[in-house]
Amino acid sequence: MKTWITKGGYKIVRLLSGRSNVFLISTDRINILVDTSTEFMWRFFQKRLEKLQVKHIDLLILTHSHFDHTANAARIKDIFKPRIIIHQTEAKYLSAGDNIIPEGTNIFTRFIVSLISKKFQAIGKYSACNCDQTVDDSFDLSGYGVKGNIMHTPGHTLGSISIIIDNEIALVGDTMFGIFWWSVFPPFASDQDKLLESWGKLLRTECELFLPSHGSGNKRSLVEKDYAKRNKTSVIEN
């Protein structure tokens, strides 16, 4: 389990990797879980929590409502009773255990979507779960004893969100990928223009590391390079 510690002492542990990353943000008093992975990863998830001796989860933040991020939310809520936060446009999908059909961003992924689009909602069905809090443009986490905030970063889906911790590390869901060394561009996105706008918002923070839900962490230099290449204005406004 890879671990990062910010200058302010916040610990971020990657509990699960592979199909979909799950992160735990911890202080001496609070545990915040980011995403839940797929249903078949449940036992691995439990073992990781046991290894870390995690007895409570105070907050569960869902970066968006796709099944590989939310499938275990209902179980986690039943066991740990965390408050669940999701963007307001994604809450209806979570409460129905449903998915937003993604769009491919290249020839290969567009072909995949064309093949599975009719079956996607059935394939990605998961246990429905109600949230406790919705966010719109931003949400301050100081009420939970954490120097950080939730930022609306649409593009992969309309309601995708990212979590900024200590203005140093950003957990970005599927707003970026960490699969390729030359690019952070995700293979699926509902709106590529909004996606690039979200990259700009994230780059206007002071974060030096961006942790995606798929793959490894991305350094700021790579994100800046990819942003400049793809963005027509290629200017990060202050």
Image (spheres, helix red, strand yellow):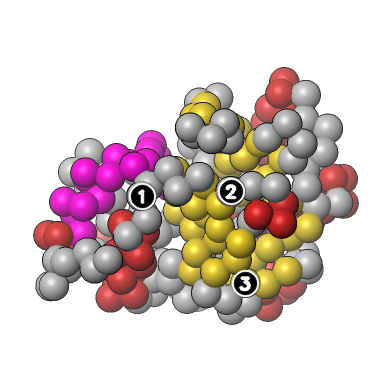
**Earlier sequence position, callout 2 versus callout 3:** 3
Foreground pick, 117 / 195:
195
| Tag shown at residue 135 | 3
- Residue type for callout 1: Glu
Which residue shows up at 29% across the image and 40% down it? 219
Query: Picture quarter containing residue 73?
Result: bottom right
**Start-end of magenta stretch:** 208-227
Label 1: how many Cα within 10 Å (few below 14, some 14–19, many 20+): some
Mark 2, residue position: 147
Q: Earlier in the sequence, mark 1 or mark 2?
A: 2
Q: Residue at x 50, y 64 (%)?
A: 151
Q: Where residue 174 appears, x then y in whole percent?
A: 43, 56
Q: Toward the viewer: 66 or 50?
A: 50
Q: Which of the two marks, 1 or 3, is nearer to us in this view?
A: 1
Instruction: Give yes or no for contact between labels 2 and 3 (Cβ–Cβ under 8 Å).
Output: no
Point out the frontmost of discs 2 and 3: 2
Report, in whole angstroms, how far the alpha carbon at label 2 lies from the one at label 3: 17 Å
Q: Are marks 1 and 3 in contact (CB under 8 Å)?
A: no
Q: Is residue 99 rendered to the left or right of residue 208?
A: right
Residue on which disc 1 sits? 206
Q: Position of residue 221 (x, y in %)?
A: 21, 44
Q: Report helix, strand or loop for mark 1.
A: loop
Question: On screen, 67 above or below 233?
Answer: above
Crowding at mark 2 (Cα within 10 Å: few <14, some 14-19, many 20+): some
Q: Is residue 54 visible?
A: yes
Residue positioned 49% across, 34% down in the render = 6
Query: Upstream in the sequence, badge 1 or badge 3?
Result: 3
Residue 125: image tag: none
Secondary structure at badge 3 equals strand
Amino acid carrying label 2: it is: Lys
Position of 127 compared to 209: left or right? right
